[in-house]
Amino acid sequence: MMRIPDAEHDDLHLGDRALIVCDIDEVVLEFVAPFQAYLIHNGYELRPRSFRLTGNVFALEDGSETAQAEVDRLLEAFFAEQDGWQTPVEAAADSLARLADRADVVFLTAMPPRHRAIRRELLSRHGFDYPMIATEAAKGPAVRALHGERKHPLAFIDDIFINLHSVRAHVSQTLLINLMANESFRALAPHPGEGVEIATGWAHAETLISAHLDRPAA
Ligand SMILES: [Mg+2]
């Protein structure tokens, strides 16, 4: 089984109970809206034309499309300064606090581990005091490494379908929830596929997860 490298995570001590693995960008922290604001600040704009960043970023000065390498550079700079830009997703902190009475919560973010410290501080500032794993590896094996053969209920929340499908492939009994805060990009998203619940927001996600936790172990 995969081991999660120490450099990528906070202290992880799971209790003998259910587990909720939760993405960060677009799930507990706004990403698209603050990144759009960051781009404007730097002379670019992100237009919601399709469900991706690359190809949808343009220079404000002449309207030219921004190349992948420059989008990558802007994204890297944004993550380095995220604490000045990213804000909590509505109702996320309250919903997670209620769910955390019944289940362990672990954040799993597909962000380069070098930005862990700044994100850790930002999360704690907004009351998200749950351990975080920051990794660029696939999410399915990471969830499998966390949960192992335990019989407890498991829920996974993410805005990106490839991550939901990765977890589905590695831990088949997981409740999979697609949640995306940004309405413009949510409207452009492809259907997440079979076996994935689409949550309209945190109230809906909390209802789905609570019902899953109430279910007797298989
Ligand atoms: Mg995300």
Image (spheres, rainbow, N blue to C red):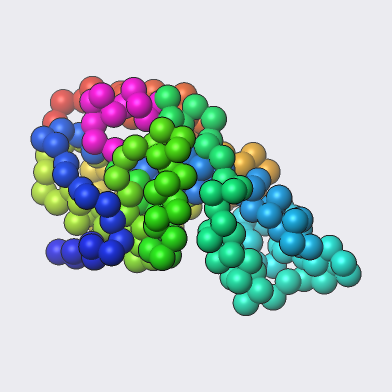
In this picture, which residue range is highlighted in magenta?
95-105
Q: Which residue is drawn at 56% across and 40% down?
A: 87
Residue 34 in view: yes
Is 75 colored magenta in this rendering? no
Q: In the image shown, does 2 or 38 lie closer to the viewer? A: 38
Q: In this view, does 68 lie above or below 181?
A: below
Q: Residue at x 11, y 35 (%)?
A: 16
Residue 70 image-quadrant placement: bottom right
Q: In the image shown, does 123 or 186 lie closer to the viewer? A: 123
| The furthest residue to the right | 62
Q: Residue at x 35, y 26 (%)?
A: 97
Instruction: Quadrant for the C terminus, please.
Output: top left
Q: Position of residue 167 (x, y in %)?
A: 31, 53
Q: How many marks?
A: 0
Instruction: Quadrant for the N terminus, please.
Output: bottom left
Q: Position of residue 145 (x, y in %)?
A: 19, 56
